[in-house]
Image (cartoon, grey):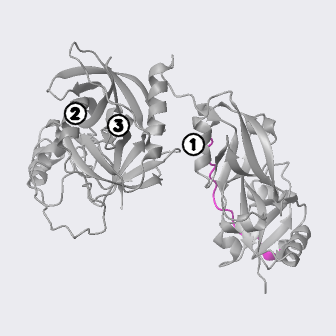
Amino acid sequence: MPVFFLRLTKAAVAATAAVFLLAAPVAGRAAARPGPDGFADLAAKLLPSVVNISTTQTVKSDRKSEGGNPDLPQFPPGSPFEEFFKDFFDHNNPRHGGQPQAESHKATSLGSGFIIDASGYVVTNNHVIADADEITVILHDNTNLKAEVVGRDTKTDIAVLKIKTDKPLVPLVWGDSDKARVGDWVLAIGNPFGLGGTVTAGILSARQRDINSGPYDDFLQTDASINRGNSGGPMFNMDGQVIGINTAIYSPSGGSIGIGFAIPSVLAKEVVSELIGEPDHSVHRGWIGVRIQEVTSEIAESLGLDKARGALVASVNEKGPAQAAGIQPGDIVLTFDGRPVTEMRQLPRLVAETAVDKTVPVTVWRKRKEVALQVKVGRLEESDQQASAQQEPPKKAPKDQGVTVTALGLTLSNITPELKEKFSLADDAKGVVVVDVAKDSPAADKGLKAGDVIMEAAQEEVKNPSQISAKIADEKKSGRKSILLLIERQGDLRFVALRIDQS
């Protein structure tokens, strides 16, 4: 089921103009807490601060396309508009005997936003105004105002606009999304379709949702109806404070099925503040220079940790803040700046929210005990983002080239000049190379493949296959069910915990 971001094209407005009344009886809620008598007073107070955002961009037509109509708007199956636009495009398509299409045309999209400062600052989603040539903000009284982009942050999908007007603007107030509880009432207000403000109500359904839209996903989930064109609109608590920015929905059709997502205000407030206040109108994020991975139950057990928690450090950037602080590959970060790290994806957000040059306490799990460190946070630069190297899957080597470790389903060998050439290994590669992985083995289940290099076993360096066999025997004697391996694949390091075959 896809995730839809809620920008609305003008063409889609016509296709969704019909109104459907979906009334249904409500089951009894004898044990439920009674809801408010109504939202009218609150909505009347908040609606003037929510705006419609209309964008226009120039789109070049693909005249060389060999199939279909590249610019045909998308409509629900069976829509009468689908056939109408198909006939229109075919008439103007030279491949169907029509006149040649223009080289380019104007495309208009609609979204929502809200006023956050009386001087004219407006907050919305970055995807609402992405690639726009012109941006128009339409106030609640239908006043049209040209807007300029103050700043944008693609990683959190937040943008700030500026408008100028003599009319008094009523700004909204940020609330604390951390204090919002699952089950609390919320209002979602947008200004889609250019028809004016639209109010829907629901509850906060869940917190800390990751929808894979960016590195700092931490969405609030709500069942308040959020539809196309609502992107960038605010989500309110019952005090009329903004606790989220409506951004996406989870839906098979693009319509609301009661699963909507909003950027929490604790994140949005800081991003907006920096976009407005920083001289370069960009977000200055903290950075410590580590590559991390999830702590699985097998990894936790192999390292003597009570349960799966924290973030496992797979590698440390040379001369980065983490290295300077003494953080090592194999450490599990348990707390950062006094805040617990219960799962891997929390750490990037905690670091990013930390002020640059601030020194913070960090607790790591190392050698089966907690170690306290102090890290001076650096600034994240675009060059610090690492992309995973891709390679063609290497061919399997004959099994007689290595020593077979049957407990893990691996065929291992010392690193030889022939294997360096075969698997494109670095000249200074150290460890034990995997030359074959048995099907349906623990190693195959964890994604190991020929050409991987095992550098450590049970957090100790290995130089030949017999050392790995000895480490497995030691782990068995200690009663452990898994062994932790440090794997290097084309310069990319990661830890893998493999179950030990007790038979």
> In the image, is residue 333 above or below residue 279?
below
> Residue 40, image x and y in percent?
17, 42
- Nearer the observer, 131 or 304: 304
Residue 24 lies in quadrant:
bottom left
Could you tell whether 4 is left or right of 486 in the image? left
Examine the structure image and report whether residue 399 is included in the region drawn in magenta: yes
Q: CA–CA distance between discs 2 and 1?
A: 33 Å
Circle 3 residue: 241
Magenta extent: 386-400
Q: CA–CA distance between discs 2 and 3?
A: 11 Å
Amino acid at the residue labelled 3: Gln
Circle 1 residue: 349
Q: CA–CA distance between discs 1 and 3?
A: 23 Å
Name the residue furthest top: 166
Amino acid at the residue labelled 1: Arg
Label 1, secondary structure: give it.
helix
Residue name at image x 84 percent, y 59 percent? 459
> Residue 178, image x and y in percent?
47, 45
Residue 471 lies in quadrant:
bottom right
> Residue 408, image x and y in percent?
76, 75
Examine the structure image and report whether residue 189 is included in the region drawn in magenta: no
Label 3, secondary structure: give it.
loop
Mark closest to the chain's N terminus, 1 or 3? 3
